Structure formats: structure tokens, C-alpha cells
Image (cartoon, rainbow, N blue to C red):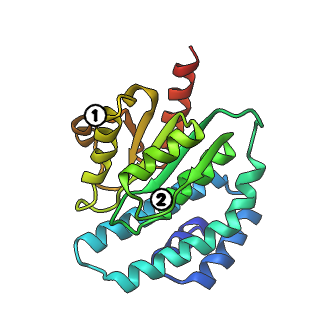
Amino acid sequence: MTTLEALVTAVMDGLEDEAIAIAQKVIEEGEAVDQVIEALTAGMREIGDQFARMEIFLPEMMMASQAMKGAMEVLEPELQKMATTTEKKGCVVIGTVEGDMHEIGKDVVTTLLQVQGFEVYDLGIDVNALDFVKKAEEVNADIIGASALMTTTMPHQKDIIEILVEMGIRDKYHVSLGGAPVTQEWVDECGADSWGENAGKAIEVLERAMEERRK
């Protein structure tokens, strides 16, 4: 088992102290931090799937989330070193929708956006659809990112689009959806602009969206 595989296993098993120690070892071995985060994100996605299939329960999922947080605290300074530009690429308002308490995926995307030069306003978890719009208007955002990790909370992503349409400001924002159950079909149904299959893809999509806006 490689050190990276050991790290993913420790996180998925909810072993926070072990995950922190192995994360430090991964850095010492010179692993690319973005690839480490992709592997961890995939592991957490599997944890979410196991929870949905009732193969694990809330305590195990919470322990895995805590272990992921511990590993991310070690990795974050390395991510900051990766920042290649101080130029502001765009302004993003991001959060997890109402009724949903999941934050790991959102936190990873938030960190990567900041590293890549985006100004990010993280609203946290359990965020009302109207609050996304209010904050976007307040800070003159370019992008609204809405995460949902449960099928029961996904309709609140659509609520954001409907509010923007009702207010006559839909075209003002690029709306990107995230979360394990999100698909291209759901994005199309909602009338959103994009989705991120994983954290890395989400950043690529939003960078392209901002390039298009500047043309």
C-alpha cells in the first residue's frame, strides 16, 4: 500500500490522528497536493455512497469527515504555496443548501478556488436559497456555487435558479452545482450553468466560465 493509499484508508476509517500523521508523510514524500486531495475526495465520495446504501451510519460518516478535516489542515499550507497568481479571477459565493449539513466537498472546492486566485465567500452549511442570492448581490459575485450531498436537499439548488429568474437577474450569475448525486441531467433540469464531477473539475469549469465572461 502506498502512503497515499494509506492516507485515504485512514480518512475513510475515521482515524483522525493517523490521517494527520500520514498526511504529513505524504507531503514529505513530495506527492502532488492536488492529486492527494483528488484521492481523498474520491474516498469521501465513497463514504457518502456507503452511507446512502446504509452500509455505514452517521457516526462512521462523521468520523471520516473529521479525519478528512484533520488531513486538510495539514495539506492547506501546501495548497497555498501552489497559488500561481495574485490576480483576482472572479468572485464566488458558495455554500451547502438548506437542510444539508455536509461541508467536506464544499470546503475542498473553496480552498482550491482561493488558491487559484478567486475571491470566495463561503456561506457554510444549511443555507437558504434566498441567502445565496442576497450575498451574491451584496458582493457583486460572478459565480454562485451550491452543494447538495443528499437527494432530498437537491431541490433547493433549483430554488436558487428560480429566485434569480423571478428577480430578473438570472443572466448575471454563472450558477454551478456540486455534490455526489448531481448529474448533467439535473443541471439541465434546474437550468444551472455547470457542475463539478469532482473538486478539480469544478475549478477547471469555473476558470473557463470566467474566461468566457471576459471575452
26 displayed left or right of 60: right
Kindly report which numbered mark, 1 or 2, lies closer to the viewer in this rendering. 1
Does 32 appear above or below 17? above
Q: Nearer the viewer, residue 169 or 104?
A: 169
Label disc, if present, on residue 54 of the rendered structure: none
**Crowdedness near tag 1: few (<14), some (14–19) or many (≥20) residues, C-alpha within 10 Å:** some
Q: Quadrant of residue 83?
A: top right
Distance of label 1 from label 2 (alpha carbons):
22 Å
Query: Which image quadrant: the N terminus?
Result: bottom right
Q: Along the horizontal axis of the image, is 167 left or right of 66?
A: left
Q: Residue at x 35, y 34 (%)?
A: 167
Does label 1 or label 2 sit earlier along the sequence?
Answer: 2
In this view of the protein, can residue 130 be seen by the observer? Answer: yes
Q: Position of residue 174 (x, y in %)?
A: 44, 32
Residue 24 placed where, x, y %?
Answer: 72, 71
Disc number at residue 191?
1
The answer to whether residue 29 of the structure is visible from this angle is no
Q: Nearer the viewer, residue 62 or 214?
A: 214
Q: Nearer the viewer, residue 23 or 120?
A: 120
Kind of residue indicated by mark 1: Gly
The reply to whether callout 1 and callout 2 are in contact (CB within 8 Å) is: no
What residue is rendered at 68% in x and 46% in y? 115
Q: Which residue is under mark 2?
A: 105
Amino acid tagged 2: Gly
Comparing 207 with 145, the one in front is 145
Toward the top, the furthest residue is 215
Label 2's element? helix
